[in-house]
Image (cartoon, helix red, strand yellow):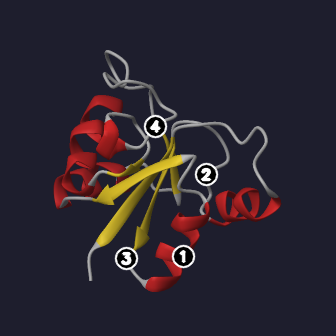
Amino acid sequence: MSDLVVIRIRGAVQADVRAERALEVLKLHRVNYATVIPDNPTSRGMIGKVKDFVTWGEINEENKAELAKKGKQFVRLHPPRGGHRRKGIKKHYNVGGALGDRKEHINDLLRQML
């Protein structure tokens, strides 16, 4: 199975307790933190709870090696150069926002944030 990278985009203001707990388990304590997790049903379940606060997708080997250089379970990233270039961070990626499943396009966002 492949790995997923999950990046926190929004803060947890007015988040329910289950979403806050899932963000803690994923080690996404602050905005612009990223973590690499295995793509399995358990991980997908946690992502489902925090889908309104994060973006995720399948990470390629080049970006995975770049994040591994940091040597941590989670990585602090810079804000994306030029902003998110979308219609807003409160909308899902498939309708022009920054949240949700980006599939392989997550690697473009990672390159902007490294």
Disc 3 to disc 1, C-alpha distance: 10 Å
Q: Nearer the viewer, mark 2 or mark 1?
A: 1
**Secondary structure of residue under mark 3:** loop
Q: Nearer the viewer, mark 4 or mark 2?
A: 4
Where is residue 103, by image quadrant?
Answer: bottom left
**Between residues 94 and 103, which one lies in front from this camera angle?**
94
Mark 1 belongs to which amino acid? Gly
Q: Residue at x 31, y 21 (%)?
A: 85
Q: Which residue is mark 2?
A: 28
* Comes first in the chain, label 3 or label 4: 3
Q: Which residue is mark 3?
A: 39
Mark 2 belongs to which amino acid? Leu
Disc 2 to disc 1, C-alpha distance: 15 Å
Disc 4 to disc 2, C-alpha distance: 20 Å
> CB of mark 4 within 8 Å of CB of mark 2?
no
Disc 2 to disc 3, C-alpha distance: 17 Å
Extreme-top residue of the structure: 82
Q: Residue at x 54, y 76 (%)?
A: 45
Q: Residue at x 33, y 25 (%)?
A: 86
* Comes first in the chain, label 2 or label 1: 2
Q: Which residue is mark 4?
A: 91
- Number of other residues with Cα within 10 Å of mark 4, as a class: few under 14, some 14 to 19, many 20 or more: some
